[in-house]
Image (cartoon, coloured by chain):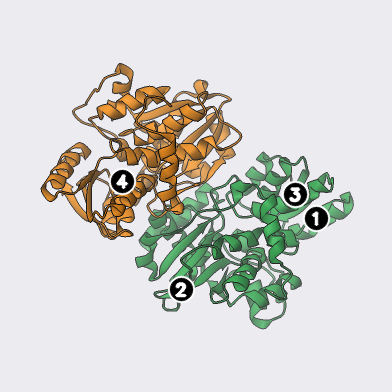
Chain colours: A green, B orange
Amino acid sequence: MQGTRLDTARIRAARRVIDPVFLDTPLYRCEALEPLLGCAVSVKLETANPVRSFKARGTEVVASRLADRGARAVVCASAGNLGQALAWSGRRRGLDVTVVASRSAPSAKLDRIRALGARLELVDGDFDVARERAAAVARRDGIRLVEDSLDIETCEGAATIGLELVETTPPFDAVLVALGGGALATGVGHVVKARAPDVEVICVQPLGAPAMTHSWRRRRVVTTDSTDTIADGVAGRRPIPAVLDDLLLVADDAVLVREESITAGMRLLLDHAGLVVEPSAALGVAAVLEDRDRFAGRHVVTIVCGSNVDVAAYHRWVGAAGRHSA
Amino acid sequence: MQGTRLDTARIRAARRVIDPVFLDTPLYRCEALEPLLGCAVSVKLETANPVRSFKARGTEVVASRLADRGARAVVCASAGNLGQALAWSGRRRGLDVTVVASRSAPSAKLDRIRALGARLELVDGDFDVARERAAAVARRDGIRLVEDSLDIETCEGAATIGLELVETTPPFDAVLVALGGGALATGVGHVVKARAPDVEVICVQPLGAPAMTHSWRRRRVVTTDSTDTIADGVAGRRPIPAVLDDLLLVADDAVLVREESITAGMRLLLDHAGLVVEPSAALGVAAVLEDRDRFAGRHVVTIVCGSNVDVAAYHRWVGAAGRHSA
């Protein structure tokens, strides 16, 4: 794909430094979902690994390059999954990892970051406030700041999913990608558009956190004052210009979905695919639920990008109460 | 491993005829489980595939050999997972598949068998009654009867899991294997004992379906009149002598666990690993819960062998009511 910040040779190189436990993840048809969604559905499952999300593909690249250079410490802001992944990747390479996160991030994510040995600093405010604080920590301590989606390693790591997708047969018609900061969408999108340009790359974001989608549609950065969604993993307000530039080159569409579609998607994935997913990972199914005609008879791949949920909230989302309205 | 019916070269050959979607399944540490279980825990995940259990490893071998010989039809008895797997493997090779199952098998399993295009014949009675009926169908129609655990292909298919386990690093101390008919235990056990003899092979069965465990302990076939367990996938009454002979050579132990330990194991895997598992797939965790001292500080692998559950029953097992007693 010409023009993006990504490069296929570098993505292939990234594969070689990522612990194999995060690579070659399951990709399989979920026929039990298909009568309900009206299309062929394959799942790319990024949750069956030590950090239960795709983020370690990127942090493995970051941490291995830092370790090669003899770095000792690193800091990132995180909605929860990047922090876990960086903690995991840093721990095995002897890096001191600091994660800055919102006090309102899911407890399960924060607990795992601590359990993996990272220093966790909590801020009052949301992910974008945490980003500012992480940058300040990096300046103060003179250490590497990892910026999700901006730092090319995070995009290259995510892009290795794209390599695994385009090397599969039979081919599929569309890939549904959760859209937050944009590392996953631009990484996967770059590879898919370079290698299988007929496959539609559709980004999906919650209506309650639409900044990047609005930016994509208007072809310029649009920020929002707040977010309101259970999909904590994609709830940003301030798109990064360089990431938007890439997204404009690789995304065929960006769609917004309602909260009730996200919970319905989580329920479908639990009941008919046996998969626990966090809200961000149900965005693809939510998009199909909201626009069945668009996908009718086609073969879609949805990237199930994470499964880190607070147990009580998860049971509330998928539980008996919601089930009646399903 | 000398003496069993299995052969490592044949197991390697089996790998080559199994659709890759069933091979090289995730194997990863679940650190979030470890404080609760008091030992290092890795999961070998056999649920992220089109039939949500390990059984297709065996049916792929069966069906490919049948197709090579020009066979047109095949029949099996099944508790539900073998039938799904044979239906899947047979469908893509143009085989007419008949599955005989108990009317009381989980609806989810029976529905999937039908959805995959197999002819489903239901019997009043349990799995061992279905076995008799399947044998009668095979005689009547002159077609191949697939007998789980007796037919060497089913053991060879399961044994490919063993190959994937022993090729991993770091090594582990024990593997916990659900014990039903014995294909999984003898297949995995054969490879582990041949290649990593210091690794303990521990078979786990419900107290409510203890026939094979009693047989292993007494070194002769012991049958029971009935079974009483939620672990439908391993609920047999009549061990097969040839399979017991193999099990005697490869199992270091066979243990029985209580129903409440099975549901506690299912809950732990859901809440702390984000995994939906059927009762049989929680047997390994149940065994650790019942004997923490035995496993303290060791590294165990538990094979999560299936996730086909009836949704209502699953929510009852893992739901709020059970949660209070956890």
Q: Which mark is residue A145?
A: 1
Question: Which mark is nearer the camera, 1 or 4?
Answer: 4
Label 1 to label 4, Cα distance in Å?
A: 51 Å
Q: Disc 4 designates what residue?
A: B82
* CA distance separating discs 1 and 3: 12 Å
Cα–Cα gap, marks 2 and 3: 39 Å
Q: Chain of mark 3?
A: A
Tell which residue pokes out farthest to the front in this image.
Answer: B69
Question: Which badge, 2 or 3, comes first in the chain's sequence?
Answer: 3
Say which amino acid is labelled 2.
Glu
Amino acid carrying label 1: it is: Leu
- On screen, residue A305 above or below A206: above
- The quarter in which the N terminus of chain A is drawn is bottom right
Label 1 close to label 4 by CB (< 8 Å) = no
Q: Is residue B259 left or right of residue A260?
A: left
- Dot 3 crowding, Cα within 10 Å, few <14, some 14–19, many 20+: many
Quarter residue A291 falls in: bottom left
For residue A63, the mark is 3
Q: Chain of mark 2?
A: A
Expressed as whole percent of the image width and height from the top left, the position of residue A8 reads 68, 65
